[in-house]
Image (cartoon, helix red, strand yellow):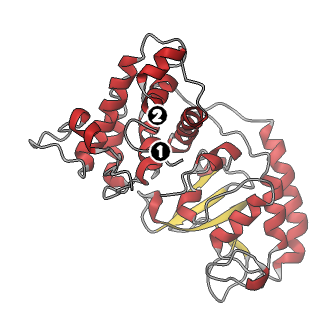
Amino acid sequence: MTVRKAWIVATAAVGAGGAFMMVLVVGVYIVAGNMVNGVGGGTKSLAKGAVPAAYSAIVQKWGNLCSAINPALLAAQLYQESGFNPRAQSAAAAQGIAQFIPGTWATHGIDGDGDGDRDVWDPNDAIPSAASYDCQLASYVKDVPGDITKNMLAAYNAGAYAVIKYGGVPPYSETRNYVKTITTLEESFAAPVSRVDPSEQAAGAIYFAQKKLGTPYLWGGNGTADQGGRFDCSGLTKAAYESVGITLPRVANDQYNAGPHPKRSELLPGDLVFFSTDPGNSRAIHHVGIYVGGGYMIDAPYTGAVIRFDPIDTAEYFGATRVTEDGAKALPTNV
């Protein structure tokens, strides 16, 4: 049980597509051997649009409150807790975007925006309070051996006493899973400071999607026999990665957080590419495809169309995700 809340536990293209795809898939591994480090340094900044624009500045600011946290880590916690929903409420009475239970809020809630009140439902108070609470926990376990951030997260989940008692992250499977989940999700909210490693499963995911070229689109389609093997956009990407042992969430905007986010210039075959009418909010993503190289993706576009190759460079291009197994496993199921 956590301290803050109860923890519950295109048909004509198909023929030519084969040779085209082979070159692209081989390219995944050629490029992998020629990665060059990018510019890094400093605290982790947020990936483009990963946090809704309404909360991005406050997460960036308060995520630097102490050395045990950073903006991407704070974003990961908020996403895990509520999916950035300021009106979220759990069966255990946890409230708001940061999911404080009333007793913890009474002790640790702060007036983050200086308007004279402490409102658990107001992200301008709740997000600063989450950062402040993290830093308070970090101060409790600052003398414990090991990584201060992991010890802080363990204290959040199991209590500071348990971290002190065991001299680090306690041997509770729930606590260890929580620490791994948040530190993994952190990578999907951080702007990469170097080239992102290619996915080992990318070629298999593309191979699966390629075999579906020409299949009619079906809203809500998961490719099951009763649906005639048809897919919608996120149903296709989910099935493609499931074919190589990675389970993604069902909807596109949650799939965005299944790994780090390469720049447009750094895309590799197998990356998921996303589209949104709101360039500042990953929660508004409405379409996803699998990048195959050369500025094209395989996608299930819309009712009346078939799974096909489409260009990715449209006005609604949002960004990309390099799916990782750990990243997919870390995604919450209740956002």
Residue 182 left/right relative to 329: left
Please report the residue visible at 52 percent of the width from the left and 26 percent of the height from the top.
150
> How busy is the neighbourhood of tag 2: few (under 14 within 10 Å), some, or many (20 plus)?
many
Task: Name the amino acid, label 2.
Answer: Asn
Q: Residues within 10 Å of mark 1 (few under 14, many from 20)?
A: few
Which numbered tag is attached to residue 157? 2
Q: Please, is residue 332 above or below residue 189 in the view?
A: below
The location of residue 116, given as percent across then percent down, is 8, 41
Q: Do tag 1 and tag 2 residues touch (Cβ < 8 Å)?
A: yes
Q: Is residue 227 left or right of residue 104?
A: right
Viewer can see residue 121: yes
Q: Is residue 289 above or below residue 116?
A: below
Q: Residue at x 79, y 45 (%)?
A: 200
Nearer to me, 41 or 79:
79
Q: What amino acid type is highlighted by mark number 1?
A: Trp
Q: Position of residue 238 (x, y in %)?
A: 69, 63
Residue at 52 percent across and 11 percent down: it is 145
Image x and y of residue 186, in percent: 52, 39
Q: Which residue is mark 1?
A: 7
- Kindly identify the residue that appears in the image at 62 percent across and 86 percent down: 303
